[in-house]
Every structure is written in structure tokens, then in C-alpha cells.
Image: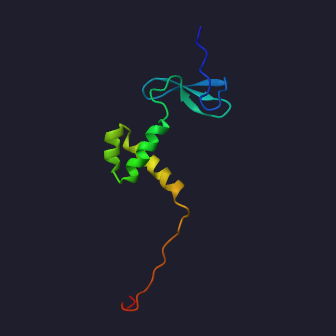
Amino acid sequence: MQDAPPPCPRCSATAVARNGSNRSGTPTFRCRGCGQRFVAAPGKGPVPDEDKAAIERMLAERLSLRAVARITGRSRAWLQRFANDLYRRRTPHAPGRLKKVRRPDRPAR
């Protein structure tokens, strides 16, 4: 007899279907309610808020992404996404394209 599939980590629904396997051969599942694709026992979980706060402080001190990756053990790809999201949240508006300004001391081409 097969084990029951795990509930969805996003919506906790039990209507879950087997959905093949990932590259390492671990069985994957798809929630019929929200469509989330997941594995039963992930190797890594979400990043704790304390780690995110420490990474924000390191980025505020202008440490490079490579240095933060070495210190925290996080991947550079994850750090780049985190930094981009942080920038988007803290930037109040998108200024748009810059307009070309002709200088009077230079002749037009």
C-alpha cells in the first residue's frame, strides 16, 4: 500500500497528486487547489528573518555579494534576488528614461 501524499505547504490542502520527479529523482507533487509544485521533504527551508536582517545590514555596509555569500553560506543567485527585491521595495518610484540634453557649447551632429 502506498503512503498518502503530503499536504500542500502553501494552502495545506490534501488534494495533492503525484507529479513525476525532479532531477535528483525525488518524487514531486502538485496541489490541485493552488497549483503549487513541491517535494515531500525539502532539503532546505525558508531563510530565517534573523538571517535576512543580517544580510540587509551587510548590504547596507556595502559588502559585495560574494563576501556576503561567503559569510552567510547563501548562494549568490539567492542573494542577488534578495537584493533586487530589497531595492524594489525601497525605491519609491521609477524615474523613467533620461532625456537627452544638448549642450550649447557643443555643435549638433
Quadrant in which the N terminus appears: top right
Q: Nearer the viewer, residue 74 or 49?
A: 49
Query: Which image quarter: residue 93?
Result: bottom right
Q: Is residue 56 toward the left or the right of residue 14 in the image?
A: left
Q: Position of residue 9 (x, y in %)?
A: 59, 29
Q: Is residue 109 above or below residue 3?
A: below
Farthest residue, direction top: 1
Residue found at x 33% / y 51%: 64
Quadrant in which the C terminus appears: bottom left
Query: Which image quarter: residue 31?
Result: top right
Q: Position of residue 25 (x, y in %)?
A: 45, 23
Q: Position of residue 21 (x, y in %)?
A: 50, 26
- Visual colour scheme: rainbow
Q: Is residue 89 above or below residue 18?
A: below
Q: Nearer the viewer, residue 17 or 59?
A: 59
Q: Position of residue 35 (x, y in %)?
A: 63, 34
Q: Is residue 88 above or below residue 105?
A: above
Residue found at x 38% / y 48%: 58
Residue found at x 45% / y 26%: 43
Residue found at x 38% / y 40%: 75
